[in-house]
Image: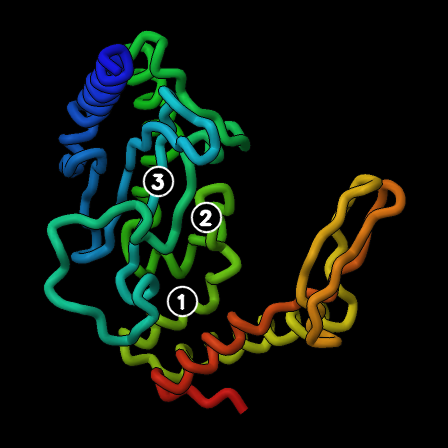
Amino acid sequence: MFSLCNHQGNTVQTVDQIESIVYEALKPYGFRKHGRTLHRFVDGDISQVIHFQSGLPSMGKRNLMCVNLGIRVPESFERTFTVKEPPRRYYHEYECNIRSRLSMLCDGQDIWYDLEKNPETIGHDILEKLKHNALPIFNTLNSRDAILAHRADYPAFDDNRDLIKLEESMIYGRRGEMSKAISLFQAYYAEALASYNHKLEHGTQIYLRKGESVIYRNEKTEKTETVFAEKNGYVTLYDANCAHLDYLKRLAQTLNIPLE
């Protein structure tokens, strides 16, 4: 028990040291430290976030660390035309609507830092990657106008890029430009409906190895089915889910947007 606690303590101290190296360099750029989060506001209430995540036990990641990135446009995250005022002192990365991981942005894969290695080396590596890859994007996407114009230019920074039309609708709605807000929302809904109908009709293919099976609800028959693989290969599941469409219908009603 003592060695475990000591190991956890060392991990905390290591992350502290790494975060301190990054923070001291980014403080002149307006970032402020809140726990494991570095945060700054741009355009009044848009958040830009750098978060140090240590460990993910559910995935077997212990004594490891990654860096998460986020941009939060309040109305886009909250899905409303009227946001809560005033903003809090800072927001977490999981409260951002534009999100990525530093390693995905720089290397195209999910890479975690080994906290057994030199923390100064890790800290300076993170800092260099932030300066050369993340900060230029933060500095470009620093206003609503810039996000509307350039968000799609950075797909590697944007895990939620499929939601761009929906989230742009919220920006225009907050501005009071209702014709644009309604048009974008309706366009997004039409795409979501077409995607659902395609999956409902043609299904989704997944790969199963011989002997593997999957239990799922068939939306065509509205029954629970078991698919068993007699050989390696792809099988088709008619597993289209209408939950997102139902959510959009409720949201449209709340925002007074006609869908028909």
Q: Quadrant of residue 130?
A: top left
Q: Which mark is residue 69?
A: 3
> Which residue is located at x 48 percent, y 26 percent?
111
Q: Nearer the viewer, mark 1 or mark 3?
A: 3
Query: Which residue is the site of mark 2?
Result: 158
Q: Quadrant of residue 53?
A: top left
Q: Earlier in the sequence, mark 2 or mark 3?
A: 3
Question: In this orientation, which residue lies closer to the viewer: 20 or 55?
Answer: 55
Residue 21, can we see it? no
Q: Position of residue 236 (x, y in %)?
A: 79, 58
Label 1, label 3: how far apart the Cα atoms are: 20 Å
- Looking at the picture, which amino acid does disc 3 mark? Leu
Q: Position of residue 167 (x, y in %)?
A: 40, 65
Residue extending farthest to the top is 118
> Which residue is located at x 75 percent, y 49 percent?
213
Q: Earlier in the sequence, mark 2 or mark 1?
A: 2
- Looking at the picture, which amino acid does disc 1 mark? Glu
Label 2, label 3: how far apart the Cα atoms are: 9 Å
Q: Earlier in the sequence, mark 1 or mark 3?
A: 3
Q: Position of residue 128 (x, y in %)?
A: 34, 21
Quadrant, the N terminus: top left
Mark 2 residue element: loop
Q: Position of residue 95 (x, y in %)?
A: 30, 53
Residue 219, can we see it? yes
- Looking at the picture, which amino acid does disc 2 mark? Asp
